[in-house]
Amino acid sequence: MDPFGELSPGRSLPPGLKQRFPDRVLVMTTDRCFGVCPHCTRKFILGRSPVVDSPERLSACVGYVKRHPKVRDVLLSGGDVLALPDPAVARFVEAFAELGQIEVVRICTRAPVSNPSRITARLARLLARVGRGKVWANVHVNTAGEARIAREAAARLVGCGIPVSSQTVLLRGVNDTPRKMLALLRALSAARIRPYYVFQCDPVEGLQERFGVPLARAREIEAYCAERIGGLALPRFVADLPGARRKTPLDLL
Ligand code: SF4
């Protein structure tokens, strides 16, 4: 139910901050989303894990980052950080972007798919302004149809100099054929959303049984796409394994 130990991180971290890798931290900004994805990895911890919902908690997270100078990348996640109002989003972005050690602040969101009008031109300009050129948007897109929905929202972000990338989850019955995956990657490229990772379904109770795709099938899909699309549109096919020091390429599984 909690394969990455997010409910019990095992060492002293500020409430709402998670760290699995030395150079990155994840900040749980909210436990709300625009919808409930049936394949959500965090479905069992949302609402049970603390979020950074006060100035004191945000200060504690910023203080932790300052004390750990190896951290250069902050993921604003949840939940969906864009479920918060603009001023709250801006406070998070600004608090981390102004730290000299931070090179990247990631907005982890599914809004371009599930609520595209949330990405207003005003929000995109605000993120660009407070983000000091460090903001990236990480969107979670699983089908070509979703990529087409996300296109206009992505254009607003890209137009303000915010790179947009996509993480996809390989899901049985949704995108687990070579042709569906290729169509997704092409639709993402057309939307100027860089395909970044395609993840094997996480080892969360119930998800593997319902959505899991066998490794051999995943490799077949990866090879099919690699033979038909350029590197710019080709994501890394990986598994996120508890305890691993990196996202594990399928070749190493
Ligand atoms: S948007 Fe992300 S965190 Fe929210 S329900 Fe979907 S997968 Fe889970």
Image: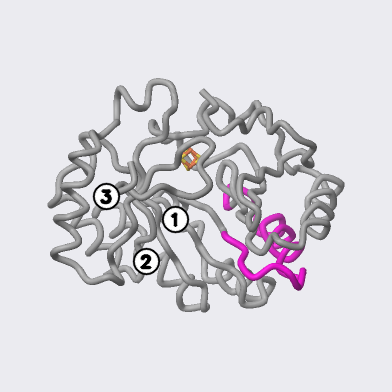
Instruction: Point out the stretch of residues depicted in magenta.
Output: 82-106
Neighbours of disc 1 within 10 Å: few (<14), some (14-19), many (20+): many
Q: Which mark is residue 50?
A: none
Q: Is mark 2 within 8 Å of ligand 1?
A: no
Label 3 secondary element: loop
- Residue at 44 percent across and 34 percent down: it is 40
Label 2 secondary element: loop
Instruction: List the residue tagged with mark 1.
Output: 139
Mark 2 vs mark 1: which is more N-terminal? 1
Instruction: List the residue tagged with mark 2.
Output: 193
Query: What colouring method underlies this structural image?
Result: one colour
Instruction: List the residue tagged with mark 3.
Output: 143
Q: CA distance from mark 1 to mark 3?
A: 12 Å
Question: In front here: 242 or 171?
Answer: 242
Neighbours of disc 2 within 10 Å: few (<14), some (14-19), many (20+): many
- Residue 87 falls within the magenta-colored stretch: yes
- Residue at 38 percent across and 21 percent down: it is 206
Residue 105, percent across and down? 62, 63
Q: Residue furthest right?
A: 56
